[in-house]
Structures are given as C-alpha cells and as structure tokens.
Amino acid sequence: MVQNRKSPPPPLSQRGGHPWNTKTFSPFRKGGPGDLMHHSICCLRVLLCGSLIALCISFFSCSLPKPNLLLVGHKLKSFEQACPLTVYNRTNLFDYMNGEAEAYLPFGFRLLYLSIFSTEKTDSRMVLEIYDMSTPQGAGGILKKYASEGGSSLPGIGEAAWSDKGIVLLRQGNYFARIFPDPSPENEVKPTMQEMIDLAGEIALLF
C-alpha cells in the first residue's frame, strides 16, 4: 500500500519572504550606508564653513585702509613736532600760499600736511611741508620744477632729494616735501643745512 507523502514546502526565499537569519541593511541603521553618507555631508559642511570664514577674514583684512602716518603723528628720532598738524586741500591751499598754489594744481595736488619740527640738540625750528600729489609723476614734476632753478642733488634720501639756498626738497612715492627754517619770531635759533637734511632723511622713511 502506497502512502501519499506531501512534498516539503519551498524555501522561504522563494515564497517572497526572508530567512530569519538573513541580515538586511537599512539606510537608517547605524553603520549602514546612510550613516556613512550623513557623516560625509557633515564633514563637507565643516570644510565649507571653514573655507568661508577664512575667505571673509582675508577679504576684510585686505580691504581695511592703512593708517595715514601723516595724521597719526610723526615719530622721529632726533626731532619733535612743535605745533599741531594743519591740512590744506585744493580749495583752501591759496590761504597758505597765495601766488604759488597755481604751480601745484596742474601736477595733481591733493593735500598739504603742514607742521613745524624742532631739533632736540639746538632747539632750532623747521617748517615741514608734505604735499600729496596723487601720483609719483606729479611729485616728480613739481620737484623738477624747483630743481631747475638751481641747487644740487642729495643722494641717498628718498627717491630724489635736492637742496638750494637754505631749503631741502624731497620726493618719495606720491609725496613731495619741502623743509626750510621757520620764519616766525619764535625761532631764535636757525637750523643748519645738515639738520634739515637729517630731517628729510627721517621723513623719507615714513612713506
């Protein structure tokens, strides 16, 4: 007598299910591919934020204006500023040098910084005029105008320096400077030519 035996059921995987001992990866399970992707995105965000901060610091540090040494005051070794600084522009330059201002305007004159310095040894006083001529060409042009009237060159001071009849001229970058004895009655001791040359040498180092 033949007995009918039922065939064993097919594996669970063939019936649309999963074996109990089969591990499946979820994108939300710790250690899975999703966790690695989230970690990568966080690292990328940190790098982008750091780069952005560095870029902002570099931009603002480069865009900050440099302090004007002529306005904050001169710090010289052998000379002291004897009076407050006075600044003239294209409008009121004629109040200081009426009749001579016309010579500066065509060369690009912008500002005049006027001050008086005294020497520490003899207490002699000198007028220091520093003209902002906007460009090196403008500063060189006004120096050439004065130098054509006579005098001699002073090597080793600024980009160019000149002396003539008790006055010292200096050019450095956009600036042209004149140094001469203070004509006011308070100046009892007249400076020597060497003292004015020494002042020109120290002023040239400011630019």
Image (cartoon, rainbow, N blue to C red):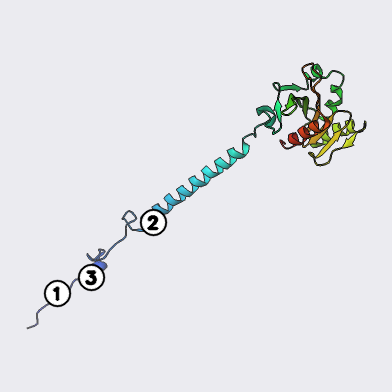
Q: What element carries label 2?
A: helix
Q: In which quarter of the image is the N terminus?
A: bottom left
Q: In which quarter of the image is the C terminus?
A: top right
Spatial CA span between label 3 and label 2: 34 Å
Please, what is the three-letter code of the amino acid marked with disc 3?
Answer: Pro
Spatial CA span between label 1 and label 2: 49 Å
Viewer-side residue, 2 vs 133: 133
Residue 21, percent from left and from top: 23, 66
In the displayed structure, 120 sits above or below 96; it is below
Residue 61, percent from left and from top: 59, 39
Residue at the image position 9 percent from the left and 79 percent from the top: 3
* Lateral position of residue 100 relative to residue 31, left or right: right
Spatial CA span between label 3 and label 1: 15 Å
**Disc 2 target residue:** 36
Residue placed furthest toward the left = 1
**Disc 1 target residue:** 6
In the displayed structure, 187 sits above or below 108; it is above
Sequence-wise first label, 3 or 1: 1
Please, what is the three-letter code of the amino acid marked with disc 1?
Answer: Lys
Quarter of the figure with residue 77? top right
Residue at the image position 70 percent from the left and 29 percent from the top: 70
